Image (cartoon, grey):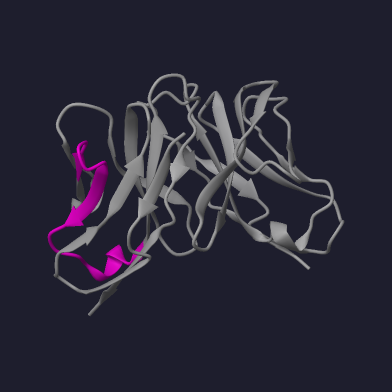
Amino acid sequence: EAQVTQNPRYLITVTGKKLTVTCSQNMNHEYMSWYRQDPGLGLRQIYYSMNVEVTDKGDVPEGYKVSRKEKRNFPLILESPSPNQTSLYFCASSLFQGAGTDTQYFGPGTRLTVL
Amino acid sequence: AQSVTQLDSQVPVFEEAPVELRCNYSSSVSVYLFWYVQYPNQGLQLLLKYLSGSTLVKGINGFEAEFNKSQTSFHLRKPSVHISDTAEYFCAVKAGGTSYGKLTFGQGTILTVHP
């Protein structure tokens, strides 16, 4: 089954403790992206990747890192999480470099709480 | 840069009633428009998209949307809703050309269908 998977689905952590949220897709998609969803703000893009070893900042990249060493994986790294990073995170992927005719597929989400 | 405004944060309706969820956008270039649905505790699923051509777009689950360029709107409609349509709905816009897939989302509209 074609899908985007994220792990963990739920995570509670403390300020300053490094964490990684994994994202994997099995559709051989070139484009991958991370979003955060906050009430009243919709989804905002954190980082995106157009292919292996090609990443760039989205609208809200501060406090996050990403890497794209393999085409299928796009982990999101929080080196020193803070409470304002408490949010619902979504990974998404699409086949081409985000052309308008291309559909983005979303993972199930990771709910992160930073105490 | 583009932006999206969803005019209603919450829309309560009774089952079998019609519904319209409103979306306005702004952009200095041509755009592609999308509606996504998020059921409770799930990721986002594409409902429909407007890329070009006919301004009336039909999607899944009986939803449709109309692109109005002069009013920069892309309202979502369904003639008769079901309890199962209860979800949060997001309007999104992507600039035409080499935008590398960046989707700009609205704030979301929570549709609650009452029996």
Q: Is residue A1 visible?
A: no
- Residue A112 screen position, x and y as percent: 68, 60
Q: Quadrant of the C terminus of chain A?
A: bottom right
Q: Nearer the viewer, residue A78 or B27?
A: B27
Residue at image point 25% right, 45% down? B74
Residue at image point 73% right, 25% down? A69
> Where B108 sits versus A58, above or below?
below
Residue at image point 64% right, 44% down? A60
Q: Is residue A54 visible?
A: yes
> Where B92 sits versus B107, above or below?
above
Which residues fall within the magenta stretch?
Answer: B66-87
- Residue A3 screen position, x and y as percent: 50, 40
Magenta region includes residue B22: no
> Where A7 sits versus A115, above or below?
above
* Residue that lies at the very extreme toward the bottom in this rendered image: B115
Magenta region includes residue B83: yes
State which quadrant residue B17 falls in: bottom left
Residue at image point 49% right, 33% down? B102
Describe residue B91's horizontal placement relative to residue B78 as left or right. Answer: right
- Residue A1 screen position, x and y as percent: 46, 39
Q: Nearer the viewer, residue B73 or A65?
A: B73
